[in-house]
Amino acid sequence: MNMWSSGRRVLHELLGQPAVRSFSLTATQNTVVVERWWQVPLSKVGSPPRLHPRRHRIYRLVEDTKLAPKEKMELILTQTVPKLGGRGDTVFVKKSVGRNKLLPQSLAVYPSPENKEMFAEELRLLREGKPEERIQTRTGQLTVELLKRTKLKINKMPLDEFQLNKEVVCRQFQKKLGVVMPPHALSLPFESVKDLGDYWCEVTVNGMDVVRVPISLLPYEDPSASYQQQLKTQMLQAAADGLQPAEEEGAAVKAVAAVEAEAEEEGAAVKAVSDAAVEAEAGKDSVSQVSGAAAEETAASTQTSQDTTAPPSDGSKKD
């Protein structure tokens, strides 16, 4: 009996422990909009509709919110954020970006009526308030950074009445840097100059930051002529860089070919001399043979002539 009671107690303790799961079995909750495939007929007033047991349980899918495009979150930036905007700008970002980055790092706030009113007042003070109360906008900060690393180069026009003044500098800022420069934001230490040299000007951005930009007045250059000269110089340099190794290789090949030609000429000369010597020796042998044969023939002919012309001997007379 005690054994059964202890077993039941252990089993009860095991079953009473909460189940431990390593993963969640809860399904993702989404909203699905459906409608009945078959329309339910109208019923009498005060009576419930009469539903068919099978037909009116067939539904048609109208919309699945899981597949619908997600709406973006509207926020107001409290600081300058790259590629988004500056302080006070209203932006629309993904909910993940807003909840995970902008809001936790205090880079943005929700567009509540209070926040909208606060930033609207700040914008009004930026335009109309005192200079010490203003805050530079994002575009103004980018403009200041651009002007700090800029040097304006102006080519003097080939005209006697040409003068470097505020109007010319404003036009060159817009032409070469793409910065619209109002005359009241530019200050020059001179009224107008004609001499070539280095100068400077001060630019005021949004009435707050002042940046000094160096200016260089250079002699006139024809853009087309300078471009052609630069292009020609580049082509000549590239051709020289490309032909120098080829010329060295060609000179080496020519030197090797010249050495081989000289060796062939020396071999041909030696062969010619040896052939001439062999021919000379052969000539000598043939001449000696011819002279020996001629001598033998001459001796034979002499002997024959002596035999035919010899006088009769005295012995025949005695007989």
Image (cartoon, rainbow, N blue to C red):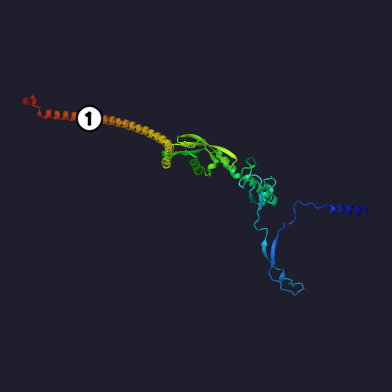
**Residue count near mark 1 (Cα–Cα under 10 Å), binned few <14, some 14–19, many ≥20:** few
Query: Quick one: SS at disc 1?
Result: helix
Q: Is residue 218 above or below residue 57?
A: above
User: Picture coordinates of residue 57 (x, y %)?
Assistant: 72, 68
User: Picture coordinates of residue 131 (x, y %)?
Assistant: 62, 41
Direction from residue 118 to residue 188 in the image, left or right: left
Direction from residue 314 to residue 157 in the image, left or right: right
Where's the C terminus, which quadrant?
top left
Q: Is residue 314 above or below residue 16?
A: above
Direction from residue 150 to residue 39 in the image, left or right: right
Q: Is residue 44 above or below residue 304?
A: below
User: Picture coordinates of residue 291 (x, y %)?
Assistant: 20, 29
Residue occupying the far bottom of the picture: 44
Amino acid at circle 1: Val
- The front one of 229 and 124 is 124
- The front one of 306 and 132 is 132
- Please give the residue where the numbered disc 1 appears in the rendered image: 287
Where's the N terminus, which quadrant?
bottom right
- The front one of 187 and 45 is 187
Residue occupying the far right of the picture: 1
- The front one of 274 and 281 is 274
- What is the count of numbered marks? 1
User: Picture coordinates of residue 114 (x, y %)?
Assistant: 70, 50
Q: Is residue 12 visible?
A: yes
Q: Is residue 241 above or below residue 32?
A: above
Q: Is residue 87 visible?
A: no
